[in-house]
Image (spheres, rainbow, N blue to C red):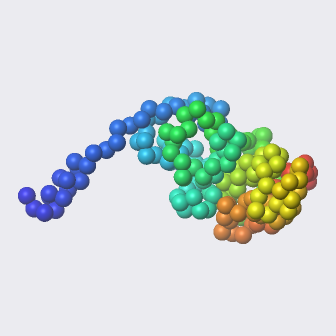
């Protein structure tokens, strides 16, 4: 047996993890899957459930393109394992709205032209929805001027700080901030 044949035989004998049967609640639909327990939530959504709205950007939690809402909180799905979310309510961009009934944040992004190439947009929108929930709960950020105030003032700096985990390579940031402000202020435009 040659050295390359021996290496190939060794690689084929590497133990694979047994598949885990999981049930995920995604966009108000219960979905059953069998996945490698090391499968990220992002890969489960995109590859197993064919929900392509959630994007794979950096795959290291640095760009925010994969942001989804889990129990109302924003999460980088590339950094989370699918098996961790059996009892959670997962919402992707597909679950926020549809072309006939856009979520207010989706509508604001369209009206304010809060996207250019659109690759980061699903993550930006999910993050913005989660961020407004954090503001409503009174959670301060690094930009919050008065952390003891009963209500966080949603300034441009506050929005930019809270959205800093979501990168837009096209630099549509002023329009993204305007869209978020419109929704926060209840301004339909």
Q: Is residue 176 visible?
A: no
Q: 176 left or right of 153?
A: left
Q: Residue at x 63, y 58 (%)?
A: 64
Q: Residue at x 88, y 50 (%)?
A: 151
Q: Residue at x 58, y 30 (%)?
A: 30
Residue 133, placed above or below residue 26: below
Q: Position of residue 178 (x, y in %)?
A: 84, 61
Q: 71 left or right of 22?
A: right
Q: Based on the displayed image, in which of its 4 quarters is residue 158 positioned?
A: bottom right
Q: Is residue 3 visible?
A: yes
Q: Position of residue 18 (x, y in %)?
A: 35, 38
Q: Position of residue 159 (x, y in %)?
A: 80, 60
Q: Nearer the viewer, residue 135 or 103?
A: 135
Q: Position of residue 42 (x, y in %)?
A: 54, 48
- What is the residue that sits farthest to the left in this orientation? 1
Residue 133, placed above or below residue 124: above
Question: What is the count of numbered marks?
Answer: 0
Q: Nearer the viewer, residue 127 or 98?
A: 127
Q: Nearer the viewer, residue 107 or 3?
A: 3
Q: The C terminus lies in which quarter of the figure? A: bottom right
Q: The N terminus lies in which quarter of the figure? A: bottom left
Q: 163 left or right of 146?
A: left
Q: 184 left or right of 26?
A: right
Q: Based on the displayed image, in which of its 4 quarters is residue 95 positioned?
A: top right
- What is the residue that sits farthest to the front in this orientation? 148
Residue 82, placed above or below residue 79: above
Q: Residue at x 65, y 32 (%)?
A: 28
């Amino acid at each position: 047996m040659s050295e390359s044949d021996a290496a190939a035989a060794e690689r084929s004998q590497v133990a694979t993890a047994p598949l885990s049967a999981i049930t995920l609640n995604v966009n108000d639909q219960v979905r059953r899957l069998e996945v490698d327990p090391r499968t990220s939530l992002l890969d489960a959504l995109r590859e197993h459930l064919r929900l392509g709205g959630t994007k794979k950007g950096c795959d290291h939690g640095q760009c925010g393109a994969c942001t989804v809402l889990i129990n109302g909180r924003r999460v980088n799905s590339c950094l989370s394992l699918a098996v961790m979310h059996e009892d959670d309510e997962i919402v992707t961009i597909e679950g926020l709205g549809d072309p006939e009934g856009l979520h207010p944040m989706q509508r604001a992004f369209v009206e304010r032209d809060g996207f250019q190439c659109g690759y980061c947009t699903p993550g930006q929108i999910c993050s913005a929805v989660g961020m407004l929930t954090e503001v409503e709960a009174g959670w301060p950020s690094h930009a919050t001027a008065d952390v003891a105030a009963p209500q966080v003032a949603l300034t441009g700096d506050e929005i930019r700080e809270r959205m800093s985990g979501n990168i837009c390579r096209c630099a549509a940031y002023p329009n993204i901030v305007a869209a978020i402000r419109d929704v926060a202020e209840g301004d339909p435009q």
